[in-house]
């Protein structure tokens, strides 16, 4: 695996000035304008200035993309290619993504306000790793032979669903695409994917690289545009066999309605969260815990579905831990996402920033106390910057402890007993992730078992790696899991073939 050096700020600025990003729809192997010819303007969240003119797709464009994907699914140009050949093409694609790491990272930073150290150093390498991992699994998954009676043979095999629709959010544009595309393509499906309307650039470039890697035309199609036009058209399309969505719980619910009112397509939902971080009184090394706590909630400006936005800490160590968190935050520079030293970039757009600031106001109004942060900063840049904000004295029934803020806001809640900590952690409609810190193995096992969450990190902020499934309980998910071989299951149908043997003559 190659690694991409994180560019210096002047190099990034020069590269950004020279970029000519792809901005059209990608259908049947080529770029084209939307059928209506319209475009919309995106902006750079770090400056508030226009960034790109993106093709404004609509239902007719979705029809064209699904038709191309259907042809490619039905003629077997991908599904009937040997798994080894599928693997080779997808591995080549992952290699190209890695080779273009600096460019893809820059596109993500400009589009989403994410720090370049994260996009180039983490997001793009993880994107390549994800596609490579699923590609490598393509020729290693076996079917089964059932224990059927004498005189019969029964095989149980997995077949691609057919045409997969994917609708993804703006917080990790390339990675969220890879979480869908890796397993869907490795298992032989064709795909129509819609990026979030704010962040199309990296995915369009990835689609171009897929063609270059040898992916046949029509297998991967990208339709850009707004959710209520393009996303709904994918969700309702009668010729889409399965739809994989990552985004808010509110929009996720709609995909169930779309499917129920049309062709009962399979629906896979990865949704929001309000994840707890529990720190028990026996936990040692508060500096290291503080570093994990800060990463869990402030990484990616808190625009993270698994953000550990509720710190549930034992009363006896709360003050010391908060001091350690404040000390940790001193090494989290906020500012220009193109600066390789920046750890907190800009929020995605003005509307979202105002929403986050509204939650901060609600926290103050309801009686919580701001320890650090709490105001918009760097307004003179035109960008949407909110620094890490920590609220002490939070009760779990306050708005900031109940609703997904999707911004850099941490709520600190105290507990006295293990049972109270678990009850507080589970007292949420969400169940995506949780982490806990203790040096007592018994506490670790008991609490990890009792937490109602799809991913539990013990003594670390971790969502696992590509080998482990990612998905949520309760309002955090539905129908399947991203990552690992579990993701292959969700993009395949199970087929039984029962053969009755004729007796020997
Ligand atoms: P969102 O739900 O607003 O949008 C997600 C996608 O759905 C976008 O592509 C959007 O254009 C599209 N969409 C919007 N309205 C639609 C409609 N009516 N019909 C069909 N599609 C529509 O979410 P967002 O603001 O882009 O992302 C933030 C949310 O995503 C947060 O809730 C976060 O927790 C969640 N998220 C979850 C995971 C996970 O793996 N569980 C990962 C990342 C983000």
Image (cartoon, rainbow, N blue to C red):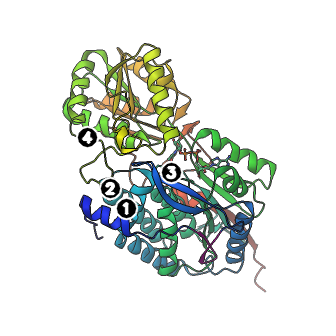
Q: Earlier in the sequence, mark 4 or mark 3?
A: 3
- Dot 4 crowding, Cα within 10 Å, few <14, some 14–19, many 20+: some
Dot 1 lies on which element?
helix
Mark 4 and mark 3 in contact? Answer it, CB < 8 Å: no
Instruction: Name the spot of residue 357 as percent of width and height, x first.
Output: 45, 30
Q: Which mark is residue 116?
A: 2
In front: 50, or 367? Answer: 50
Residue ID at (35%, 29%):
389
- Left or right of 235? Residue 179 is left
Q: Is residue 128 above or below residue 465?
A: below
Q: Are marks 4 and 1 in contact (CB under 8 Å)?
A: no
Marks 4 and 3, how far apart at CA: 22 Å
For the residue with label 3, is its CB less than 8 Å from the closest atom of ligand 1?
yes
Q: Secondary structure at mark 3?
A: loop
Residue 207, x across and y down, in percent? 52, 71
Q: Disc 1 marks which residue?
A: 106
Dot 1: few (<14), some (14–19), or many (≥20) neighbours within 10 Å?
Answer: many
Between the C-alphas of marks 4 and 1, the distance is 20 Å
Disc 4 from disc 2: Cα separation: 14 Å
Please give the residue where the numbered disc 3 appears in the rendered image. Answer: 170
Left or right: 77 as drawn, with respect to 139: right
> In the image, which residues are magenta?
24-33
Q: Earlier in the sequence, mark 1 or mark 2?
A: 1
């Amino acid at each position: 695996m190659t690694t991409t050096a994180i560019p210096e700020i002047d190099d990034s600025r020069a590269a950004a000035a020279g970029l000519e990003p792809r901005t059209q729809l990608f259908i049947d192997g080529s770029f084209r304008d939307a059928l209506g010819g319209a475009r919309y303007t995106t902006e750079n969240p770090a400056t508030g200035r226009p960034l790109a003119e993106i093709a404004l797709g609509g239902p007719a464009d979705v029809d064209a993309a699904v038709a191309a994907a259907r042809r490619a699914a039905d003629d077997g140009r991908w599904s009937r290619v040997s798994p080894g050949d599928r693997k080779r093409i997808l591995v080549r694609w992952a290699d190209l993504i890695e080779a273009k790491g600096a460019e893809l990272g820059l596109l993500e930073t400009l589009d989403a306000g994410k720090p370049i150290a994260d996009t180039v150093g983490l997001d793009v390498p993880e994107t390549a790793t994800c596609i490579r991992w699923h590609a490598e699994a393509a020729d290693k998954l076996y079917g089964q032979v059932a224990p059927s009676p004498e005189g019969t043979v029964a095989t149980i095999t997995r077949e691609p669903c057919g045409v997969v629709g994917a609708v993804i959010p703006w917080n990790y544009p390339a990675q969220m695409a890879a979480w869908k595309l890796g397993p869907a393509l490795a298992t032989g499906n064709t795909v129509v994917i819609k990026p979030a309307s704010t962040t199309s650039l990296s995915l369009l470039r990835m689609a171009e690289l897929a063609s270059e890697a040898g992916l046949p035309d029509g297998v991967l199609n990208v339709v850009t545009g707004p959710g209520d036009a393009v996303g709904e058209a994918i969700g309702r399309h009668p010729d889409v066999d399965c739809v994989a969505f990552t985004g808010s719980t509110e929009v996720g619910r709609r995909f169930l309605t779309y499917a129920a009112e049309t062709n009962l397509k399979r629906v896979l939902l990865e949704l929001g969260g309000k994840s707890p971080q529990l720190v028990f009184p026996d936990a040692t090394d508060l500096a290291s815990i503080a570093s994990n706590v800060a990463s869990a909630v402030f990484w990616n400006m808190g625009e993270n579905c698994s953000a550990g936005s509720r710190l549930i800490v034992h009363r006896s160590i709360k003050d010391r831990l908060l001091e350690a968190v404040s000390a940790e935050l001193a090494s989290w520079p906020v500012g220009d996402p193109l600066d390789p030293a920046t750890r907190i970039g800009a929020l995605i757009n003005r509307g979202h920033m105002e929403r986050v600031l509204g939650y901060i106001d609600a926290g103050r109004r309801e009686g919580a106390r701001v320890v650090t942060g709490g105001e918009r900063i760097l307004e003179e840049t035109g960008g949407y910057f909110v620094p890490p904000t920590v609220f002490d004295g939070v009760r779990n029934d306050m708005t900031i402890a109940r609703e997904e803020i999707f911004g850099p806001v941490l709520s600190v809640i105290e507990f006295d007993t293990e049972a109270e900590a678990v009850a507080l952690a589970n007292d949420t409609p969400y169940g995506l992730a949780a982490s806990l810190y203790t040096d007592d193995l018994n506490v670790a096992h008991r609490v990890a078992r009792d937490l109602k969450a799809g991913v539990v990190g013990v003594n670390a902020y971790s969502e696992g790696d590509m080998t482990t499934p990612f998905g949520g309980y309760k309002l955090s998910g539905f129908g399947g899991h991203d990552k690992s071989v579990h993701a292959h299951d969700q993009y395949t149908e199970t087929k039984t073939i029962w053969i009755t043997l004729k007796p020997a003559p």
